[in-house]
């Protein structure tokens, strides 16, 4: 998947640590799926750290991910008191009034929602 220059610049700061998850398919974290949480991603100014499925050896390939597992919440951050460790982010829509699941790579979608 090609990202335009702006998207690449937005998503690069989100990467804290990346590695490969060699599962054949992204786990459904809301239905007993298990994440390999050794590999986490900084979720920008939210104050969150999270895990997203990676389907290939490309360390930034989260194109098959559709969920974000919250692995840490910084005290005093915008997410503090709203999200907790082990919460699963299924999508973003800006208001929360109408839940919208991720239908593509959650990294650029989350970055656009933050912007």
Image (tube, grey):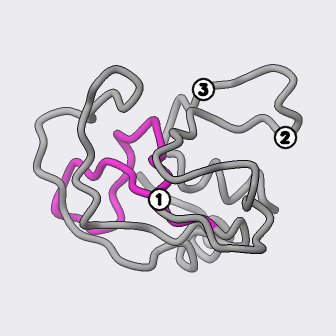
Q: Give the range drawn in magenta.
A: 48-71
Which residue: 60% across, 65% down?
73
Residue 57 within the segment the image draws in magenta: yes
| Label tally | 3
Pointers 1 and 3 in contact (C-beta within 8 Å): no
Q: Earlier in the sequence, mark 2 or mark 1?
A: 1
Residues marked 2 and 1 touching at CB (< 8 Å) = no
Residue on which disc 3 sits: 101
Determine which of the numbered discs, if any, sits on residue 50 in the image. 1
Question: Which residue is more in the foreground, 84 or 69?
Answer: 84
Give how far across and how far down residue 109 sits, in percent. 64, 48
Q: Which of the two discs, 3 and 2, labels the residue nearer the N terminus?
A: 2
Which residue is nearer to you in this view: 78 or 41?
78
Q: What element carries label 2?
A: loop
Q: Is residue 101 above or below residue 36?
A: above
The reply, left or right, for residue 84 in relation to residue 78 is left
Q: Residues within 10 Å of mark 2 (few under 14, many from 20)?
A: few
Position of residue 15 measured from the top left corner of the image (x, y, whole percent): 46, 74
Q: Is mark 1 on a helix, strand or loop?
A: strand
Quarter in which the C terminus is drawn: bottom right
Mark closer to the observer (2, 1): 1
**Residue of label 2:** 94
Q: Rounded to the nearest whole Å, what is the CA distance between mark 1 and mark 3?
A: 17 Å
User: Label 2 vs label 1: CA separation?
Assistant: 19 Å
Q: Relative to the observer, which residue lies in front, 45 or 73?
A: 73
Taking the spot 53% from the left edge, 60% from the top edge, the residue there is 3
Q: Is the magenta stretch mostly helix, strand or loop?
A: loop
How crowded is the residue under tag 1: few (<14 C-alpha within 10 Å), some, or many (20+)? Answer: many
Residue at 84 percent across and 40 percent down: it is: 94
- Say which element carries label 3: loop
Say if the magenta span includes residue 8.
Answer: no
């Amino acid at each position: 998947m090609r990202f335009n220059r702006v998207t690449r610049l937005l998503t690069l700061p989100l990467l804290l640590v990346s590695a490969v998850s060699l599962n054949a398919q992204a786990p459904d974290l809301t239905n007993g799926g298990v994440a390999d949480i050794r590999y986490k991603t900084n979720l920008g100014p939210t104050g969150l750290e999270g895990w997203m499925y990676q389907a290939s050896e490309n360390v930034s390939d989260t194109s098959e991910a559709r969920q974000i597992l919250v692995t840490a919440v910084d005290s005093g951050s915008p997410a503090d008191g709203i999200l907790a460790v082990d919460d699963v982010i299924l999508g973003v829509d800006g208001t929360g009034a109408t839940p919208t699941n991720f239908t593509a790579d959650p990294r650029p979608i989350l970055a656009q929602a933050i912007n």
